[in-house]
Amino acid sequence: MGFILRAHHHYNRGYDRIATRLREDFAGSAAVACAWVAMDENHRALAVDNHGPTLRWAQRYAHRTLGKRAEDLHLVMSDVVDIAPPLVPRVDAVAALNFSALIYHDADDLKHYMQSARRNLRPGGVFVMDFFTGFKTGSTRTRITPDDPALPPFVYIWEQRALRPRSRRIDCRIAFEVGRGRGRRILRGFRYDWRLWSAEELVEAALGAGFDHADIWGKRYNAGLGFRSTRFGPLPRAGLGRLDPTGDNAVFYLVANRR
């Protein structure tokens, strides 16, 4: 959440604009929207998702975590491109995180979504989406111990199954391992059919969608100054071509701003 506030401030220096309203697209459990509301008593959030059962779970989660302030979170069941002002108010930031916007495989579809995101922003607003570079087949396993003592520990499995180099279409899966020994079970969770977009393609799509500025944010490191120089911020436009979608693994953010 601090990153979204920082990005909004970055593009609004010299203006009396403070980000208080956030919209989370492809919200799922609405964890980002809930965290935004919890951050400040003046914050309000809108969470949009097209899956009713997931939004009902999100509503219960919001009441557990936010209490009375759950009324400051508005949940909407809709395709993200179909819900816009005047049906809903404009916001200071639209967030499409957890790689959700990678569902768009076609450049025109991606641009259409970004145009929709821009329509939902107030002047000075920012659109934020994350993406990653680097794809290697294989899986990683992480043992999780839930905070709720009623829930048993489990193993979270992230699997990167396949990449089609020509289209950069990728197949990723999530599964959960519960129990041990003879009682061990693998529960299949989610399958993701994504496209690995390049940094340059995302910037081009955002500018083509009408945003006034579009930058890739990531860690910057000056080899001459050592690790103390590492900071998170906009990367030089000239170096974006070196961020190979199928190269080294790293997470970056597209931040686009409308005046």
Image (tube, rainbow, N blue to C red):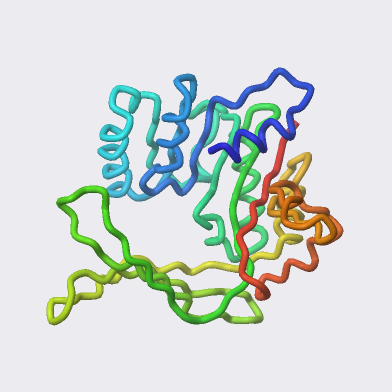
Left or right: residue 211 versus residue 54 is right
Residue at position x 19%, y 60% from top?
152
Image quadrant where one finds the C terminus: top right
Q: Position of residue 45 (x, y in %)?
A: 46, 31
- Relative height, residue 8 to residue 95 (above, below): above
Left or right: residue 138 versus residue 109 is left
Residue at position x 60%, y 27% from top?
19
Q: Position of residue 213 (x, y in %)?
A: 77, 42
Residue at position x 53%, y 35% from top?
84
Q: Position of residue 243 (x, y in %)?
A: 73, 66
Q: Which quadrant of the structure image shows residue 238? A: bottom right
Residue at position x 30%, y 22% from top?
68
Q: Position of residue 212 (x, y in %)?
A: 78, 39
Left or right: residue 100 versus residue 67 is right
- Relative height, residue 138 to residue 119 (above, below): below
Left or right: residue 125 versus residue 76 is right
- Taking depth in this image into account, of 109 and 230 the one nearest to the observer is 230
How many marks do you count on the picture? 0
- Taking depth in this image into account, of 201 and 119 the one nearest to the observer is 201
- Taking depth in this image into account, of 217 and 166 the one nearest to the observer is 217
